[in-house]
Image: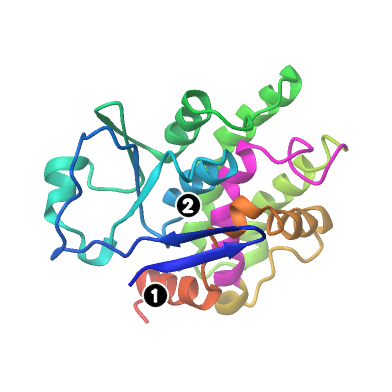
Amino acid sequence: MAASVATGKIQEVLPPLLDSSSNPPTLFDGTTRLYVSYVCPYAQRTWIARNYKGLQDKIKLVAIDLMNRPAWYKEKVYSGNKVPSLEHNNEVRGESLDLVKYIDSHFDGPPLLPNDPAKQEFAEELLAYSDTFNKVAYGAFTSKEDPETELGPTYDYLENALAKFDDGPFFLGQFSLVEIVYGPFIERFHIFFLDVKKYDIFKGRPKLSLWFEELSKIEAYAQTQRDPQELLAIYKKLFLGI
């Protein structure tokens, strides 16, 4: 059954998940399709970018059930068999960061990066750090180390990064591609570490706490958020087997 997302004046009826019993869409018929999973943080990045640029009518969502994915997705759509992927101009592309940049440069709508060269340079620095940030966090999921010792430096890095520009609550001052890259992961890490490790990533980090509070007010982001308990249950099953 299709779900709906309502935020402010915008409501989008989300298509149902396609699983191994589902038929594929009519591929390469001129329709631009974004293949996602509603619970995947990498896919959420591209979903946010689509929404922020107001492309709901130009880029159709196709939701894949990752726990029971259809064989045709790998065979006919994207050989990497991961989400997200984007079907556009008779080609299919993958990798979330590449796709966010592609959507920004190939479609109309508000730009995801400012014109300021200093901010663009800092954005690249933060994007380059995102893989390290995620690797440390996922490593801590099953670690016995003290959470603050293991995780603290990565969150302190972000806290300090938020002090660089003072013209808004976000990393570059205003909402940008950097929020899109970090937001879905910080959302999940906060939920998981608070429940499993009793560790609050926002404690003692007021800028990061405000950042997430303000991020949740961005309509394009809020439209992609899921029930925290659903995300927690998925991560517990994936990483802890419970």
Q: Main secondary structure of the magenta part?
A: helix
Between 214 and 88, the one lying in front of the other is 88
Q: Nearer the viewer, residue 154 or 106?
A: 106
Residue 68 falls left or right of residue 141:
left
Q: Which range of residues does the magenta coloring cover?
A: 167-193
Q: Is residue 132 something one can see in this rendering?
A: no
Give the residue at the far bottom of this rendering: 242
Q: Which mark is residue 44?
A: 2
Q: Secondary structure at mark 2?
A: helix
Residue marked by disc 1: 240
Residue drawn at the location 73% of the way across and 50% of the way down? 156
Q: Residue, x 53% and y 58% (percent of image)?
A: 224
Of tags 1 and 2, the one toward the viewer is: 2
User: Residue at left 47%, top 52%?
Assistant: 44
Q: Amino acid at mark 1?
A: Leu
Is residue 131 positioned above or below 17 on the image?
A: above
Looking at the image, the residue that sits furthest to the right is: 166
